[in-house]
Amino acid sequence: MSDIRLENLTKRFGSFTAIENMNLHIRDGEFLALLGPSGCGKSTTMNIIAGMEKPTEGKVHFGDREVSRVPMGKRGVGFVFQNYAIFTHMTVRQNLEYGLRMNGLPAEERKRKANEMASFMELTSMLEKPTAGLSVNILQRIAIGRSAVLEPAIFLLDEPLSNVDAAFRSVMRYELKQLQRRFKQTMVYVTHDQLEAMTMADRIAVMDQGVLQQIGTPLEVYNNPANVFVANFIGAPGMNLLEGSLVSEGDRLFVNFAELQQKIELPESLATATQAVKSRDVVFGFRPEEVELDTQPGGLTLPATFLERIGARTILHLGKDVCEVKAVFENDVEVMLDSQVAFRPAMGSERLFEAASGKRIS
Ligand code: ATP
């Protein structure tokens, strides 16, 4: 079994807490993305899984085996970093065979495995070339191949695509997923890029300030964010989040936006959910992809401030500062800048969060 369990994991550097009481179960054969902004503790978590750092408190298990204090070399994990650490005085083949040679594999077996990996990573034509002078894209491909050829049951990748160019990144996203399908490793992939996480991962663990915020499939974290942080971090652009307060009128419940002097009615399911909440201060959320332009009464109205056209896709910016809303359309929209635009979240797409804690109300 190559599942990974982090149990009450805490890491402090002096008085600074980089990871706080983290519990995470990464399933055998799963592709898990550790996602969060810079400094949130992703690499520290990864280094603890790899054995490069020791936890201050808590345990790491690989299957039934506790490995918290086992050194990196004895954990049997493959690790690829942001900065490809390949040997530039060797050829591509020598790099691919390096670990196999260290493991004492006979020459024929090394050759066969390196050829197979080269073919998989599209390196066959350059196998006998020296690595010095090869492009960053190719060097990172070699670094991934060199680790993957050892067929580790656990494969850790820390921002492996952040130094390569955008076109190559998209190719590699596909290839890494293929690699994992083929070798069925448990793969942990650190990234700050939600698109990478959303496109590749079976599940995403979202972190902020050393705390695990949510773990779920890409669709779960997109559709049902546990809190305001996840709602904002997932999606491009992130979820629209407007601060307001709950007000009742008869048996109807509204969110009132004081700054806008407008209010919007909550659907019954959300109105019911608010009964368990003490404070009336909330954050009202809806995805930019779920905005409908609508002149019927009952929605909100804001001025059009900016139109971003990205190919066929259009991002319409409405209002600004704390009252800014973005709306994404797959086609062009006919809206005049500075005109007042009436809109509403599509039915059922409304999300509500407690203002004080940021937690989802559902
Ligand atoms: P990035 O993508 O920028 O590397 P990250 O999410 O991977 O971000 P970490 O590298 O895990 O973040 O760092 C988490 C926090 O711990 C940061 O504030 C970092 O400065 C701090 N930190 C990491 N390693 C050490 C160390 N050896 N000594 C002191 N502080 C550290």
Image (spheres, rainbow, N blue to C red):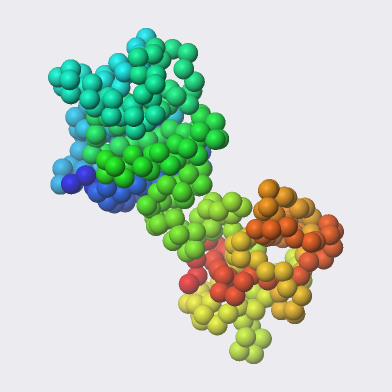
Q: Is residue 237 left or right of residue 66?
A: right
User: Percent position (x, y) of residue 257?
Assistant: 70, 69
Which image quarter: residue 305? bottom right
Residue visible at 67% across and 69% down in the picture: 292
> Which residue sits at x=40%, y=34%?
158
Displayed quadrant of residue 85:
top left
Q: In front: 309, or 70?
A: 309
For residue 126, side relative to residue 291 (left or right): left
Which of 196 and 49 lies nearest the eye of the viewer?
196
Q: Horizontal and vertical percent for residue 71?
A: 22, 29
The outermost residue toward the bottom is 250
Side of 52 relative to 306 (left or right): left
Residue 189 image point, x, y percent = 39, 41
* Above or below 30: residue 46: above
Residue at the (27%, 47%) spot, across then down: 29
Does the image show residue 56? no
